[in-house]
Image: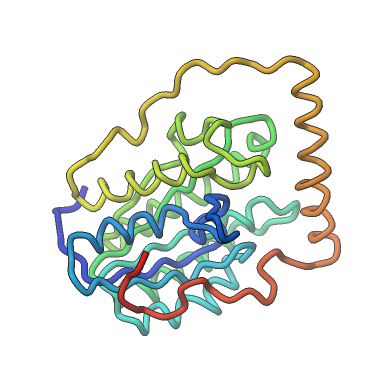
Amino acid sequence: MQTNTTYTSFVAVGDSFTEGMSDSLPDGGYRGWADLLAARLAARTPGFRYANLAVRGKLIGQIVDEQTGPAAAMGADLVTLVGGGNDVLRPKCDIGRVCGLLEEAAERLAPSCKRLVLMRSPGRRGPVMERFHPRMERLFSHVDELAVRHDATIVDLYASEAVGDPRMWADDRLHLNAEGHRRVAEAVWQALGHEPEEDWDAPLPPAVRPGWLARRTSDARFAREHLGPWIARRVTGRSSGDGRAPKRAELLPYQG
């Protein structure tokens, strides 16, 4: 845990997790843990500035090429870097290359800020994620090494049973829901040395298992609305973030 430092600016770098999917807003946009964290930091510091360069679907190479340069140039006090998750979930993944690119990102960002935050990003518990477990562990071992090398703060969300609980995830089974993002914001808040407002890793009450028909209906809807389109994008080489600009591309005074 870091000391309770006052931060005057914050830049978030990454993919859909940091963009805020699927913490939906009434206007169709997304909020997410980074926006929630920025709001809490802004409440303590007049003139607090915030940028969120994260874009859904981005691979770690794209994050390095498109986000790390602009983020480093902003010279923010606080920078969060989360990436590589989209790479790991692809059928063919050169995990050594992913780790190397993540290292390149950290090397660009660490000298530009007072505090770099890295994460062991969360994973939804279930049989699908189990097949990717060896890749995730290798990636996160490298994240640990980078945190030591750059004196970065690390937030371990992957080990959390609560955040990994399916009830913390949206219907697409890939992104956290509003409660999941709220817990992540609290986890980062505490990792930065601020007084806890709650136990972000508090266990959920026992789950009530849906009946067979409800499970099959849910699976069919998931396949139709989410899995099918995801596979189609992979086959055609498209990404959900193609042509999409960051929601907060400039480091400006925070306004919720």
Q: Position of residue 195 (x, y in %)?
A: 17, 44
Looking at the image, what colour scheme do you see?
rainbow
Is 103 located above or below residue 47 in the figure? above
Image quadrant holding the C terminus, namely: bottom left
Is 77 located above or below residue 206 in the figure? below
Q: Residue at x 43, y 42 (%)?
A: 157
Q: Position of residue 17 (x, y in %)?
A: 52, 55
Left or right of 2? Residue 224 is right
Left or right of 220? Residue 246 is left
Extreme-front residue of the structure? 26
Front residue of 174 and 83: 174
Picture quarter containing residue 186? top left
Q: Position of residue 71 (x, y in %)?
A: 41, 77
Is 202 located above or below residue 174 in the figure? above
Q: Residue at x 61, y 66 (%)?
A: 58
Picture quarter containing residue 169? top right
